[in-house]
Image: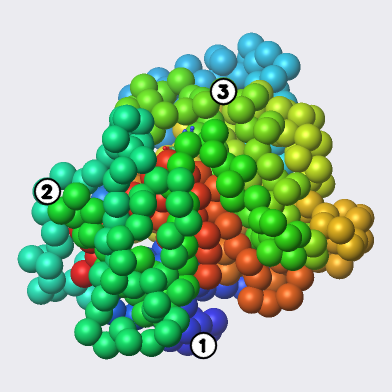
């Protein structure tokens, strides 16, 4: 079976290809751990959310709910279906188009019994006796920290490790201004940093720039050949959910029109990957206004299907407002050399690929960089940046108003 060949590789890489289904299963903890040599990402703090179970066999998940609460909900949705306005109709059409692709990917996952077994112990993945090493206390709120008048004085101390005498770690052991400043770890080991009595872990060969959107132009490289080949963007889209409002500030769509995607693009071109919600209004804004304004040409769509540790979907596939999946729109932005058509021709991305994973913290996306890498234009290693990031990854620049969020030592062993 494909499990026999793939399981050992999956345990190392965190990525499992579901054959014949154009799909992957990802364990983000294992993927992220490849950025670290001394510390390890803690699975129990990564998988901090619990999802209510609706214990139906997968073939029934979208067909015949058997309890009355669910039946009522379904009926409500059904009545709604009769009165779909044109926007809802469009959203429903998109959903119907991708439904079979998602079901096929999910079925492929459910067919991998050995993989499913591994899924069940995802949360305590090798963590038996490490609980005390997780640091306690409250996490820093960087969004708040960055908005006070003292913000420009805050410093972070990059700590020297006993055996860090190498030249590549020249900056380690120094204090750096926290906001509006490029801070990096060029070394080939992760390092520890200290800020207001809390510890942060910076992965090898990574950097961050913490600022508000107003300062994003500071990221624009002086030379086009020091631009980026892979640009992942997860904007703080406005959303009616009150829950989201407490988690991070959001911005109206028009703010994203001015993101300097063209100026961040490497002269060899860039693959641009944009996370979007399932709201139809947003999808049409991206297609008709945002991508054209950025100079990005849409190439393919990738879907992130969310499952629980038992392999079931986190919610019913056909629930109109709670889809168990999100979309990543992929497109190309050309540099000086090739035009977009040539880039599209050279890097043929299969449409409707599916990435399956168990979700971590609220709105936290799985690390999809490696899945995308084969479609990234230009020389390797590719230069990668994530905009509106909350974490750091080896080989990447992270920008946002809280890129250290998930680097707090409490997320590590
Ligand atoms: N991709 C991230 C992850 O997987 O954890 C989630 C990103 S979340 C959707 C959007 C981020 O944008 C939040 O961290 C939010 O604080 C940040 N943000 C909101 N307004 C911002 C602004 N004006 N400037 C910079 N970042 C901002």
Question: Which is more foreground, mark 2 or mark 1?
Answer: 2
Q: Nearer the viewer, residue 352 or 145?
A: 145
Q: CA distance from mark 3 to mark 1?
A: 47 Å
Q: Is 25 rendered above or below residue 169? A: above
Residue occupying image coordinates x 21% and y 69%: 413
Pointer 1: residues within 10 angstroms few (<14), some, or many (20+)? few
Q: Is 4 rendered above or below residue 63? A: below
- For disc 2, the marked residue is 137
Left or right: 390 with respect to 319?
left
Assess mark 2: CB under 8 A from ligand 1? no
Q: Is 28 rendered above or below residue 283? A: below
Q: Position of residue 212 (x, y in %)?
A: 48, 37
Q: Tell me which label, 2 or 3, sits earlier in the chain.
A: 2
Q: Tell me which label, 2 or 1, sits earlier in the chain.
A: 1
Q: Nearer the viewer, residue 241 or 149?
A: 149
Residue occupying image coordinates x 65% and y 16%: 84
- For disc 1, the marked residue is 5
Left or right: 104 with respect to 134?
right
Pointer 3: residues within 10 angstroms few (<14), some, or many (20+)? few
Q: Nearer the viewer, residue 29 or 73?
A: 29
Q: Nearer the viewer, residue 371 or 163?
A: 163
Residue occupying image coordinates x 70% and y 46%: 261
Q: Position of residue 104 (x, y in %)?
A: 61, 57
Left or right: 334 with respect to 7?
right
Say which element carries label 3: loop
Point out which mark residue 291 bears: none
Point out which mark residue 252 bears: 3
Say which element carries label 1: helix
């Amino acid at each position: 079976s494909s499990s026999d060949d793939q399981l050992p590789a999956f345990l190392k890489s965190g990525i499992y290809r579901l054959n014949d289904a154009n799909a992957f299963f990802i364990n983000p903890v294992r993927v992220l751990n490849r950025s670290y040599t001394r510390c390890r990402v803690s699975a129990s703090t990564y998988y901090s959310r619990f999802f209510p179970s609706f214990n139906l066999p997968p073939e029934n998940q979208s067909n015949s709910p058997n309890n009355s609460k669910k039946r009522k909900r379904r009926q409500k949705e059904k009545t709604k279906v009769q009165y779909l306005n044109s926007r809802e109709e469009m959203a429903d059409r998109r959903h119907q188009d991708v439904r079979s692709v998602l079901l096929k990917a999910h079925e492929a996952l459910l067919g991998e019994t050995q993989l499913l077994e591994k899924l069940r112990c995802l949360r305590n993945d090798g963590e038996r006796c490490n609980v005390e090493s997780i640091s306690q206390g409250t996490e820093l709120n960087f969004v708040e920290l960055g908005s006070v008048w003292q913000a420009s004085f805050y410093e972070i101390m990059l700590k020297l490790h006993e055996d860090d005498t190498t030249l590549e770690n020249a900056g380690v052991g120094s204090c750096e201004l926290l906001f509006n400043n490029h801070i990096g770890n060029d070394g080939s080991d992760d390092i520890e940093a200290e800020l207001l009595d809390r510890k942060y872990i910076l992965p090898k060969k990574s950097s961050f720039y913490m600022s508000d959107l107003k300062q994003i132009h500071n990221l624009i490289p002086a030379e086009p050949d020091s631009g980026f080949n892979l640009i992942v963007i997860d904007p703080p889209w406005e959303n009616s959910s009150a829950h989201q409002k407490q988690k991070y500030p959001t911005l109206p769509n028009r703010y994203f029109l001015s993101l300097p995607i063209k100026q961040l693009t490497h002269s060899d071109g860039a693959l641009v990957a944009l996370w979007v919600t399932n709201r139809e209004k947003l999808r049409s804004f991206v297609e008709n206004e945002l991508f054209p304004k950025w100079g990005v040409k849409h190439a393919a769509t990738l879907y992130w299907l969310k499952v629980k540790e038992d392999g079931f979907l986190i919610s019913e596939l056909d629930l109109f407002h709670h889809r168990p999946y999100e979309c990543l729109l992929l497109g190309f932005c050309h540099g000086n050399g090739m035009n977009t058509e040539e880039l599209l021709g050279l890097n043929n991305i299969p449409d409707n690929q599916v990435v399956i994973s168990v979700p971590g913290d609220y709105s936290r996306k799985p690390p999809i960089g490696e899945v995308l890498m084969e479609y990234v234009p230009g020389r390797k290693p590719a230069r990668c940046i994530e905009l509106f990031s909350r974490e750091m990854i080896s080989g990447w620049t992270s920008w946002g108003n809280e890129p250290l969020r998930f680097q707090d030592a409490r997320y590590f062993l």
